[in-house]
Amino acid sequence: MRTPVLVAIREYLENIRTKGFWIGVMLFPVLILIAVQAPRFLEKATPVRALVLVDQSGLFEEAIEQVLARDFTKRRSIAFARYFEKHLAPGSTYARKRDRHKERSLEEVPASALNPARAEELMDTLEDFSPQMLDLLGTEAAWRQQLAAADRFLAPHRPAFVNPEPRFRRVPLPSGLDPGAPAAELVQGLRPYLLGEHKLAGSGKDRELFAAVIIPPRVREPKLLAVLGGGAGPAAGGIEYWSTNLADSDLSSLIERAVNEEYRRLEYEKQGLDAATVRKVQKAHLPFQTMSPRKAAGKEEVSAADVIRQYAPIAFVYLLFIGIFTISQMLLNNTIEEKSNRIIEVLLSSVTAGELMMGKLLGIAAIGLTMIGAWIAALFAVLALHRGPEAEFVDQALGVLVTSNLLPLFAVYFLLGYLFYAGIFLAIGSICNTLKEAQNFMGPMLMLMMVPLVTMFFIPKDPNGTLATVLSWIPFYTPFVMMNRAAADPPLFDQVGTIVLMVLSTALVLWLAGKVFRTGILRTGQPPRLLEVVRWLKGPA
Amino acid sequence: MTTAALVLDGVTKNYGSFRAVDELSLEVPTGSIYGFLGPNGSGKTTTLRIVLEILKPTRGTVAVLGRPSALEVRHRIGYLPEEKGLYKKMKAWAIIAYFASLKGLDRRTARARAYELLDRYGLEAFREARTEALSKGMQQKVQVLASIAHDPELVILDEPFSGLDPVNQEVMEEVIRDLARRHRTVLFSTHVMQHAERICDRILLISKGRKIFDGTVPEARRRIPRRVRIETADDIAPLTARPDVSSAVLLPPDDGAEAAAQDGPGAHRWELEVAEDADTQAILEACFQNRIRLKQFDHSEPSLHDVFVKLVGADAREAGRR
């Protein structure tokens, strides 16, 4: 046992110094950091979108202006909630309240315009159920009042609150364009602005025209509506939204909703219905609760944590995949290095091929465990750094990780999957002289390996269905698919049976790989044909 | 002589229908330097691999340090393969220590040995250098040191001189002599005869997998007739008439036409084959008596090179064409 350990130590020390290892280690924490930080960063980094609105019908301009104003009010309120939280005077009533909230879960914290964790949610509710409140909050007087009211809770020496930039700003039609011209002509004139060839008049960095909305004069005519209602063909004569950025649909959906709400209101009026009553009826709402029979009686309500628990395995499958293939690749590279450098011959005068193989497997497994350990540590570190009422999701994710069996299962499937694939990669490495030759074998392997990545997102939707069950019993996929299903309590037969099968097939793969390894490792010249490899497998070791 | 460090008996290795080693038997006495000579493709490396049990022989037996299996005594053997490679990213001392520890040394001793050897053979400045940063010659030295760091009783070196400059070739010879002085057995293969001639106690010459010669260097020399080389413009008939000169062969000009022109017209180089017991001084006297003006008279013993060319030249050329 001494020799394999020596080989393993060398493999470990050598690989831990490689760039590949450190990239592998850093990749995951960086990804989590990005995932946590990106939304906030994007929010700050997105420039103010300039919008040109030409309403030739004269019906919707006011409604659109209104939603743009509400959007800004929401944004300002959320920003103020953050500001309030950050600059709360220690010891004030609010600060004490906040500290109490930190101990509770998200559902228990009361929604408040001054609580950053729930301000956004509150604003959305306001917009849906009483937009007038938002309009009121948006007035200058109400705003000053709020600032004044907050003042006594805040630390005396704090920077003044700075209004956030609005997401969207309406700009006038560029000079020289006639607002009464036909849509086609207007678009012709706006096109260079939309394409970024012309800048808008004025100074500052927001001089790109982001979008133009053109509402033709006779947009409400029934004949036209019939055509539009059919949904076929281009919306000639309908409302046109022009923009080069098709990915960011926030503005277009905002306007579409505003226009249609206003349009419906006009239609109700035309039918002689009271718009306020209709709105009230429209907002009527029966509570709808998702429950799970798996949970204890009285606690069947599905919480955010349950959803996290359901989807967390996807992240683990992904980690499993990256982990296993990063280190199997290392194993392949090392084996080929030893072979092409002919170090193998000196090694084989000191160790047997079996000892060498075992040492390599152990050393690289240690590398893999180090990497995974670093990932999990990084995960906890990042999550812990982002705790607090604002990152309630993070708290719950932490809770799920600590309380569920996901981590131990991950370790088991990682080891089994690694040994299984490592055996195959070792055998490939032993019969190839260069990485290029190995790539010929790797192609089909990669195809085979892509399957769990493709099914990763489908399996949680039907975790104990036929596809999932069948894939679980194929050793190539067992670790990934069973990890995928881990949250859904698969039948005990599947859980135990697949692990037994996996252990057996891993042993078989390693045994066969050992035979190929012993013969292949000293071979030079062309890689052998498949038939020849099969002959080695049949022959004595 | 004590018991042999290595005994091969009737070892044969077939690769399909190709016979790489054919009924080879040999005995390497303990404490000797044993040269394993032969042209390219003659089966030297295959034989060494069989000795080390990296390959299994088709037939025949091997006894290494008195044991039937080299793996049993692998901690007492050092091996330098023909194709030399090192882990590129490892430091010089670490690679020596690693191989020594694989051979049973504990890590601390292995490290101390690595430093000691690097210092002794002029590589103290490169202890911490990664092997990829070393020149080819230095890499090879490191490799040799790695193969002897555990102080093995039997050292097997496959083509240890190839790729080394003349200075380092001498260092390599010194390494081998050092080992022999400490009663280690060294078996090395080469196709460069000068090294074998200088340092070997015994040599074995193989060609096409078959043993051609096995014995000491003087014994090898005696395998070809004694010769005298002379260079003269005069008629050598009086010499060929002597009973102790059996034949005379005209050799091609030595240094090209230019040298021949300086020597004056008609200077020829001859090789006279002489009887085993011939007195070369008498032949020299005969030259004077017969007014044969000599530009050169060479009665040195045949070199191992001559022996090699004579014994395996035809095979080697044939192998080269294959």
Image (tube, rainbow, N blue to C red):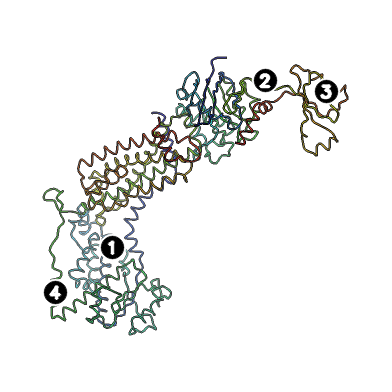
Q: On the same chain: label 1 and label 3?
A: no
Q: Nearer the viewer, residue A514 or B97?
A: A514
Tell me the subunit letter for badge 4. A
The residue type indicated by label 3 comes to: Leu
Disc 3: which residue: B239
The residue carrying pointer 4 sits among few (fewer than 14), some (14 to 19) or many (20 or more) residues within 10 Å by Cα, namely some
- Helix, strand or loop for disc 2: helix
Q: On the same chain: label 1 and label 4?
A: yes
Q: Position of residue A78 (x, y in %)?
A: 26, 64
Q: CA distance from mark 4 to mark 2?
A: 120 Å
Tell me the subunit letter for badge 2. B
Q: Position of residue B16 (x, y in %)?
A: 49, 32
The residue type indicated by label 2 comes to: Pro
- Helix, strand or loop for disc 4: helix
- Foreground tag (4 vs 2): 2
Viewer can see residue A8: no
Q: Nearer the viewer, residue B256 or A17?
A: B256
The residue carrying pointer 2 sits among few (fewer than 14), some (14 to 19) or many (20 or more) residues within 10 Å by Cα, namely some
Q: CA distance from mark 1 to mark 4?
A: 38 Å
